[in-house]
Amino acid sequence: MTINEWEDVNIKLSVKPKMRDGLIFYTSRGKEGQDHADNFISVGLRRGKVVYRYDVGDGLEEIASTYPVRANEWHRIELKNNKDKAVLYVDSHDIVEKKNEGFAISEAPPTNISIGGMENIQSKPQAGFARGFDGVISELLVSGRPIDIGEEALASFGIVEQSTICSINPCQHGGLCVPANVHRGFACNCERTDGFEGEFCERRSRKCNGEKCAAGSCVLDESNGSHSCLCPYGRIG
């Protein structure tokens, strides 16, 4: 993370946990191998609750979600932190915040982001978790920037699984399921369908050969494979 991203933290994760405990995300600023980094951010599960730990220049702080999250279900976690306050959002409705009394981001170089745990996790007590995450992490955004969980800037530990949702193909009407860095871990490509659109290619498109049918419906002429707009009574065009 750049120093600008540290000064206005905005991190979003989508996770599907199997267990109630484990470190999901960790990063810090400071020399490699330093036990107590100048600044750090960690988030994980503790007895089912999402716990956000951080040091942004005024010592170790911690906030936790009000309610535990359910195992084997998708959850969206968002972390924010700036000179005013830290905020933890879980599934948009569980919101916890804490005022920052001090705020100072180190000029020291940042470490790589660790996903699902870290090497020698016991040597980093500030992270606050004794084990790595067990489950699926489908999405990671830093300041709105999608981060490929497989890229070199990340270190992956714990039992972080790839989403297998495409093996059952949730896309309808012949849509193509594509693994993606989004909340559910996949996106449906509807280009190959017979005129369908939507998150799951579930609804008939109102576009016909690039034109949008206003009040009418786009229908297939099976004799030649073309599409045209079928107008309701009282409408032409």
Image (tube, rainbow, N blue to C red):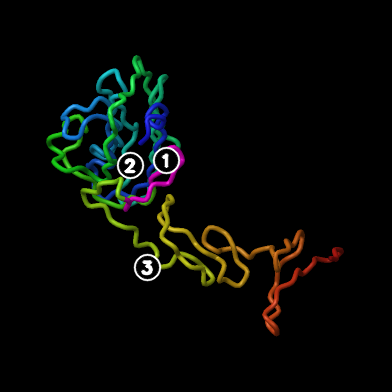
Q: Which mark is residue 75?
A: none
* Residue beneath the point at 33% across and 19% down: 104
Q: Residue at x 60, y 63 (%)?
A: 203
Q: Residue at x 35, y 36 (%)?
A: 1
Contact, mark 3 vs mark 2 (Cβ under 8 Å) = no
Residue under label 2: 69
- The residue mark sitting in front, 1 or 3, is 3
Count of residue discs? 3
In this view, the residue in front, 221 or 103, is 103
Q: Could you tell me residue 113's position as x and y percent?
A: 29, 41
Measured along the vertical axis of the image, is residue 78 above or below residue 186?
above
Which three-letter amino acid code belongs to the residue tagged 1? Asp
Q: Within 10 Å of the Cα at label 1, are there few (<14), some (14-19), or many (20+) other Cα atoms?
A: few
Rendering quarter of residue 77: top left
Q: Secondary structure at mark 3?
A: helix
Q: Which residues are magenta?
A: 140-151
> Do callouts 2 and 1 mark residues in contact (Cβ within 8 Å)?
yes
